């Protein structure tokens, strides 16, 4: 009996299909793709660090870390806004940025005035100082100032005004190795931040932005005069409403 062939007539052996390899991207295309990815990653990173510190107290800052290493430690004790005398917040705003509640991080009028005076006067808002202290480094380079100007509106959009003041009061330097209003209140006056009097608060605000060259407990005539002006300014912004965005007692 003839053996039947295992091959079935009429059926051809299937051949594997060839996959078409996509054409290689040119160098400009690869560079554009890399640039887009870098920008997106940068935006995501900035958004993350801004959101995180809106909710979590910064454990340190680049400057505090550097000073701690240099000095072998610093004085710092975080206090929430409710644990700080309201007059202290009004005093630093009156001293550093009286229109704090009226701008979105950059005070354009102050910037124009600074440019017209040839740069002899400062134009940094409290929001800008917070961005510099928390995220960046000290210095006068244009690169740092550009980063500061880009980050400040983002912080203003995410953080509340009260949060900005709270962080500012807790990271500002008040003497060599003394950071934050609680450490400053203990260092200069032997009281806690919630017990600061209007005069004490004004003197702490008066030593900014030169805390290493001025003293709040042994004030020079300049510091005394500046503190008196700050006391008047703190009361003025309480009455006229320019403290309403951060001070719950300003309308009392």
Image (cartoon, helix red, strand yellow):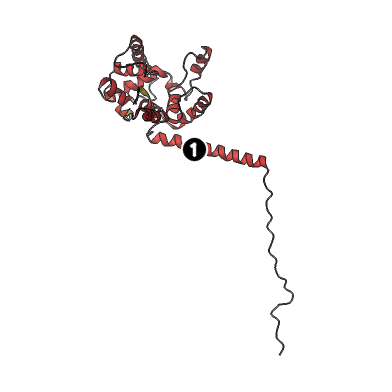
Q: Secondary structure at mark 1?
A: helix
Q: Position of residue 172 (x, y in %)?
A: 38, 24
Residue at image location 63% in from the left, 39% down from the top = 32
Q: Is residue 152 visible?
A: yes
Mark 1, residue position: 45
Decide: is 222 above or below 24: above
- Mark 1 neighbour density, 10 Å: few (under 14) some (14–19) many (20 or more): few
Relative vertical location of residue 176 with respect to residue 2 in this rendering, above or below:
above
Which of the 4 image quadrants contains residue 65? top left
187 or 113: nearer the viewer: 187
Residue at 74% in and 74% down: 10
Q: Is residue 104 above or below residue 22?
A: above
Most distant residue in the bottom direction = 1
In the picture, the quarter occupied by the N terminus is bottom right
Q: How many marks?
A: 1
Most extreme residue toward the left, as rendered?
190
Asked whether 73 or 236 is in front, the reply is: 73
Residue 237: horizontal and vertical position, in percent?
38, 17
Seen from the viewer's position, the closer of residues 37 and 71 is: 71
Q: Is residue 16 left or right of residue 188?
A: right
Q: Quadrant for residue 203, please give it.
A: top left
Residue at the image point whose x is 49% and y is 37% from the top = 45
Give the quarter of the figure containing the C terminus: top left
Where is residue 87 drawn, in percent x and y?
32, 20
């Amino acid at each position: 009996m003839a053996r039947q062939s295992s091959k079935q007539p009429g059926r051809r052996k299937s051949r594997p299909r060839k996959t078409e390899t996509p054409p290689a991207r040119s160098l400009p295309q690869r560079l554009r793709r890399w640039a887009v990815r870098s920008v997106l990653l940068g935006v995501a990173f900035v958004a993350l660090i801004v959101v995180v510190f809106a909710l979590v107290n910064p454990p340190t800052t680049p400057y505090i870390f550097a000073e701690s290493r240099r000095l072998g430690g610093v004085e710092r004790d975080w206090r929430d806004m409710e644990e700080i005398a309201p007059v202290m917040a009004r005093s630093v705003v009156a001293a550093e940025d009286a229109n704090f509640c009226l701008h979105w991080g950059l005070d354009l009028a102050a910037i124009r005035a600074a440019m017209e005076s040839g740069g002899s006067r400062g134009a940094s808002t409290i929001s800008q100082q917070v961005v510099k202290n928390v995220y960046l480094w000290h210095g006068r380079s244009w690169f740092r100032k550009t980063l500061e100007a880009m980050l400040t509106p983002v912080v203003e959009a995410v953080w509340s005004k009260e949060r900005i003041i709270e962080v500012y009061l807790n990271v500002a330097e008040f003497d060599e190795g003394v950071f934050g209003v609680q450490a400053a209140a203990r260092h200069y006056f032997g009281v806690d931040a919630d017990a600061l009097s209007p005069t004490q608060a004004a003197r702490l605000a008066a030593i900014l932005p030169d805390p290493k060259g001025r003293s709040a407990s042994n004030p020079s005539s300049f510091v005394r005069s500046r503190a008196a002006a700050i006391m008047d300014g703190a009361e003025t912004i309480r009455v006229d409403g320019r403290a309403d965005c951060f001070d719950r007692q300003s309308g009392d």
